[in-house]
Image (tube, grey):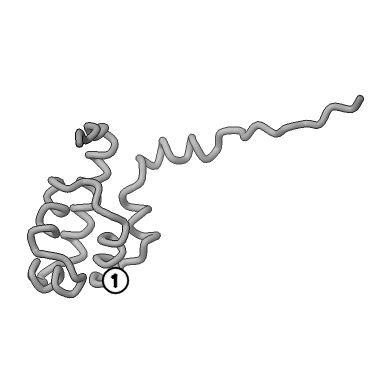
Amino acid sequence: MVRTPLTPEERLRGERLGALLRAARGERSMAAVAASAGISAETLRKIETGRAPTPAFFTVAALAGALGLSLDEILGSCAAEPAVASSVASAPVPVAVPLIA
């Protein structure tokens, strides 16, 4: 199976996720946090270093629980740049107008 290369945005999002997890882990050991989340320390290491920039949802959810983060916090920290996100959010949404016959 050939895997599609990641886009620059996906790699950047993975780097942001890794930085957030490292910061939330603080002084706790990688092994302790990984065990608490039910994943291997190597998996956590790969996520934190950006070598696994697109972890499975349930892996992220387990890490969030182990680190006391909400999924909203993770999304807010790892989503697209605020300027890009706000321009997308403020873009007009086309509305279908019924034709009167």
Residue 44 x/y as whole percent: 14, 59
Q: Residues within 10 Å of mark 1 (few under 14, many from 20)?
A: some
Q: Could you tell me which quadrant the C terminus lies in?
A: top right
Residue occupying image coordinates x 30% and y 61%: 58
Q: Quadrant of residue 57?
A: bottom left
Residue 95 x/y as whole percent: 70, 34
Which residue is farthest top?
Answer: 101
Residue occupying image coordinates x 11% and y 72%: 28
Left or right of 80: which side holds 50? left
Residue occupying image coordinates x 22% and y 39%: 11
Observer-nearest residue: 3 or 33? Answer: 3
Which residue is farthest right?
Answer: 101
Observer-nearest residue: 22 or 41? Answer: 41
Residue occupying image coordinates x 41% and y 37%: 83
Residue 93 x/y as whole percent: 62, 35
Q: Quadrant of residue 45?
A: bottom left
| Residue corresponding to mark 1 | 65
Left or right of 12: which side holds 44? left
Residue type at the position of mark 1: Gly
Q: Quadrant of residue 68?
A: bottom left
> SS at mark 1?
helix
